[in-house]
Image: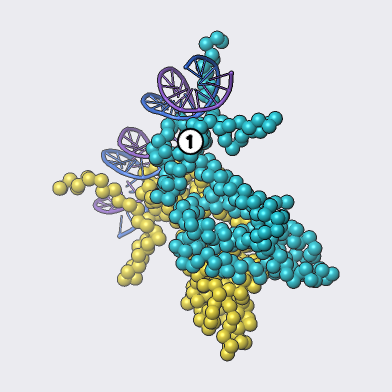
Chain colours: A cyan, B yellow, C blue, D purple
Amino acid sequence: MSAGMSVSEQKLPVCPGKKEKFFMGEIKTDRRVSRTRRLMLEALMALIEERGYENITVQDILDRADVGRSTFYAHFRDKDELLLSWFEHLRSLFEQQKEALLTSRSTGSTPDANIVLDLFRHTAEHHKLYKAVAGRQSGEMILKYLHRYLNGLLLPVFEELTKRRRDVPVPVEVTANYLVGTLLSLMTWWLDHNMPYPPEKMEAMFRTLTRPSIEAALGTPVADNSEAVNNTAEGFYRLFIDPLCCAGR
Amino acid sequence: MSAGMSVSEQKLPVCPGKKEKFFMGEIKTDRRVSRTRRLMLEALMALIEERGYENITVQDILDRADVGRSTFYAHFRDKDELLLSWFEHLRSLFEQQKEALLTSRSTGSTPDANIVLDLFRHTAEHHKLYKAVAGRQSGEMILKYLHRYLNGLLLPVFEELTKRRRDVPVPVEVTANYLVGTLLSLMTWWLDHNMPYPPEKMEAMFRTLTRPSIEAALGTPVADNSEAVNNTAEGFYRLFIDPLCCAGR
DNA sequence: TTTATTATCGAACACTATGTTCATTATCTA
DNA sequence: TAGATAATGAACATAGTGTTCGATAATAAA
């Protein structure tokens, strides 16, 4: 045993997502690790814009990133996991922004933020990438994850809103799913048609289409609360528009 | 040249979809051809139900259908084309039904048919297959085709409906896309959650969600036509519900 | 600076699947 | 029955995936 059991004990690089903090001691990520991951992500993004996700091989990424084959597989199980790690990155950025808004809210500033409008604007900025990732001729992987994520954000909001209502004609799960679906549907249509309208117009359409549906889906309000009821849709949009309320709980 | 130029001139089997009818002479499909195609389609369907489209290899289909490899490629370029041919088959069935309804309509019988309800019911009957084909964990190929097809049916309807309107707040392309998207979104949600509600309830939800949206999306009617205007949504549903109107033009 | 650690490299390899070729055989239509 | 055409199946070329492991290089910590 002295010569070190050389039986396939290749170590995996430390996952930077899991900077485990026990006993206040953060584990720093090895420079090489973050560098490699960055290179691979950059290569992936560039290649996606060029050819679309489906038309990329692992070898392409390796060549572009100038990284060894085994290194890739030391970090990710496959191409999908790399793409997913990008999505997780985006998500954490989004959640950071949410936190920021939450605190600035409690301070009193920034009365309203329109998350849907922001989404359309942000998408427009990176339309090439997003079209390649979510467009009609590409795999739907990311769209599915996004759908699930947004659903998770929205569901509690609707559950809150329907607490004081009787005879809700459409189950909240369906309504949440509907709303997210409509948003993503508008978004992909917009991208696939090369953004023929400005983000503001798209947001207006989204509102026009979904607001009356939500009123209808939530059903008749209970009698004793008629004031807070008429502006439920308004309330919803404020909730939805303000990301904090959704998951800041 | 006498011995018949044997230079890679393998003939493709006659495509039965193209039973060309010129001069009243239909070309009969060779028994062997239809038999092979039937076997391959049956194998595909069975395998899809078992494992889902993504997890099937061409070899699997070959084994199940008991058909030679080269035979497969004589008929279809790849797996996708086989699946597509199934979709085309379904579509032609649908269009036949549409024709039948159209003629029986002109005869005076069958006052109304609810195409959306029929769709939910038909899906329920074959839920295993459709879930495997369109469910969340499978590729979206068929869903995309279906989306496009339904869009094509719907667009002219909306164009007709908006002819007499001014200041339509949402472009008809967007509205059509929205409506189809919502229908398919409800459908996949339903399948993915193992059909927790009956088709009738699903159809009701679809109506609840989309009717007010459509009213809103079509915008204010012109003044002089106020009667026909208030029931535009009604008219739309009759149009949409009655498949004839959509593409029977 | 030194040292122990650990990430990267890269070439070889096994594996799975795709799609093509073609001479031979079986089946159909007329 | 004859001529035409479809099916067969084995062999092949191609392409991509994911793994292995000894050697090398970069890093953090001492």
Residue A181, x across and y down, in percent:
59, 59
Q: Nearer the viewer, residue A105 or B53?
A: A105
**Residue beneath the point at 58% across and 69% down:** A204
Question: Is residue B142 among the parts visible in the rendering?
Answer: no
Q: Nearer the viewer, residue B114 or A32?
A: A32
**Residue beneath the point at 45% across and 46% down:** A45
Q: Farthest residue in the left direction?
A: B1
Q: Farthest residue in the top direction?
A: A2
Residue assigned mark 1: A35
Above/below status of A135 relative to A228: above
Residue B3, x across and y down, in percent:
17, 45
Above/below status of A228 relative to C17: below
Residue A217, x across and y down, in percent:
70, 66
Occupied quadrant, residue B118: bottom right
**Residue beneath the point at 26% across and 48% down:** B9
Above/below status of B110 relative to A41: below
Residue B200, x across and y down, in percent:
68, 65
Q: Nearer the viewer, residue A195 or B141?
A: A195
Does dot 1 land on a helix, a strand or a loop? helix
Occupied quadrant, residue B181: bottom right
Q: Nearer the viewer, residue A54 or A104?
A: A104
Amino acid at pointer 1 = Arg
Give the chain letter at badge 1: A
Q: Position of B22 compared to A71: left or right?
A: left
**Residue beneath the point at 79% across and 71% down:** A227
Q: Position of C19 compared to A239: left or right?
A: left
